[in-house]
Amino acid sequence: MAKQNSGKIRQYRKPLNINLGMIIFSVIFIYIIICVVSYFNDEHVASYEVREGSLSQENVYKGLALREETIVTSEYSGYINYYAREGERVGSNDLVCTIDESGKLKDLLNEQAAEGTSLTDSDLSEIRTQITNFTSRFSANSFDQVYDFKFELQGTALKLANINVLENLNSINGTSSGQLVSLCNSPASGIIVYSTDGYESITPEQVTSDMFTSENYIKTQLINSELVSAGDPIYKLSTNENWSIVIPVEKERAQELLEEEYVKVRFLKNQYESWGQVTVLDNADGNTYVQLDFNNSMITFCTDRFIDIELITDDEQGLKVPNTAIAEKEFYTVPVDYVTKGGNSGETGVLKESYTEQGEASSEFVPVTIYHMDEENQEYYIDNPALVAGDRLLKPDSSDTYTISKSGTLTGVYNVDRGYADFKEIQILSQNAEYSIVEPNTTYGLSAYDHIVQNADSVDIDELILD
């Protein structure tokens, strides 16, 4: 038998056929990769459109109200009944409440409550006015106002009911050898308040930041028909129409308000506005406070220890720019007499002294950009890379010369409306942590709707802006 020939079958590999289409595709692909990588690696210049506006100051504060307040304590023990409505003025020696030592007056009041006490049209109008005032100023964010209103309305209703039984005091006292119902008259003229909180004797200089914390504030409501003991507080009197509100502020803000001396205040409770005299306090807790003194409206807020207020101040109006866009740039300064018009295009520039190859003196017109004019010194702030310190400038139509040596610094932003970083001087009117208000429509400055570089550190003057 013939020897059988065995062998492996191998696949034939075609040679790579490189043609012009593959070369072009590869070049385009590599270029796209380079562009993508370059795009993500390069720092992009973000622009900002300049608009007119003002700075939003933090003008809403929670204030601590301080008044001349006197706590009146009971000389007797028994059930207390009030006859003066909270928040109204009483005269010296006016009847405020009675102390029922025997409980007979309390029983009489309960009997009348069971029978029903009719109110006059005037009484109903008083209650209706209280309800209307409360609903107009109610805010769900301050639900504790509901409880204050509850006690206020209760006091009004009970006062109106209690007045009807005053005529029975003689008959009750006549049934015993002693006086069972004692009359409590006001020791002085003032506004009646039926609550205490321990802040009655606090002075503005004693205010601390802890006093503004709601967890540390305890208000004790003095309730009608409750049993009291001798020496217990039964009401307090606000005896002076002059009062103060103390607010915590930053030192810089305090000095701004102090410069105004008087500031207009809006009370958010009822939108009432009044002027407060400003005093700055540096208290023992290390914090700064502003004391606002008023000589009116105390009766309106006599039951409020904490009052939300808004300070109405005159905000600067102008062009609003972010602080990150602001830069400082140094420029050469030259007398205005050395700047002229020249060249084929009538550009603004200076005549720079130069010399020919033969050593003869001549002049060269160098275009410059003017960034600011110093009116006092009659100097222009100019820039051109072709000018350096030591260059001599020629005064037009004169033999006078000026050697460039002086420089000055300007504050400005980079305008990009022309596709490159064009420095524009700004005059800052006011500033906060994020934005500045600058003077609009100045000779070498900005106008509304100009586009500027948002981050001044990302560009340099006359740099081309591609995106």
Image (spheres, helix red, strand yellow):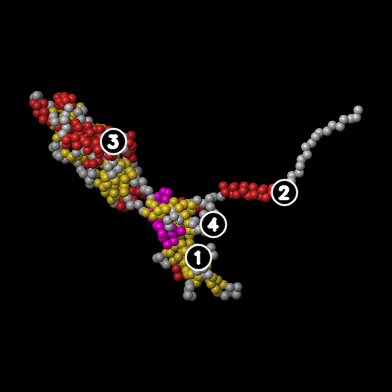
**Image position, residue 162 (x, y; %):** 16, 31
Alpha carbon distance from label 3 to label 2 = 86 Å
As for residue 439 lying within the magenta part, the answer is yes
Furthest residue to the right? 1
Helix, strand or loop under label 3: helix
Helix, strand or loop under label 4: loop
Q: Which of these two is toward me, 403 or 214? A: 214
User: Residue at the spot x=47%, y=54% of the render?
Assistant: 452
Where is mark 1, residue-wise?
368
Mark 2 is surrounded, within 10 Å at the Cα level, by few (under 14), some (14 to 19) or many (20 or more) other residues, namely few
* Numbered label attached to residue 19: 2
Give, as a single range, the part of the protein colored magenta: 424-446
Where is mark 4, residue-wise?
464
Choose the circle earlier in sequence order: 4 or 3. Answer: 3
The N terminus - image quarter: top right
**Image position, residue 385 (x, y; %):** 53, 63
Above or below for 464 versus 375: above
Helix, strand or loop under label 2: loop
Amino acid carrying label 3: it is Gln
| Nearer the camera: disc 1 or disc 3 | 3
| Nearer the camera: disc 3 or disc 2 | 2
Amino acid carrying label 2: it is Asn
**Image position, residue 27 (x, y; %):** 66, 50
Q: Which of these two is toward me, 210 or 152? A: 152
Where is mark 3, residue-wise?
145
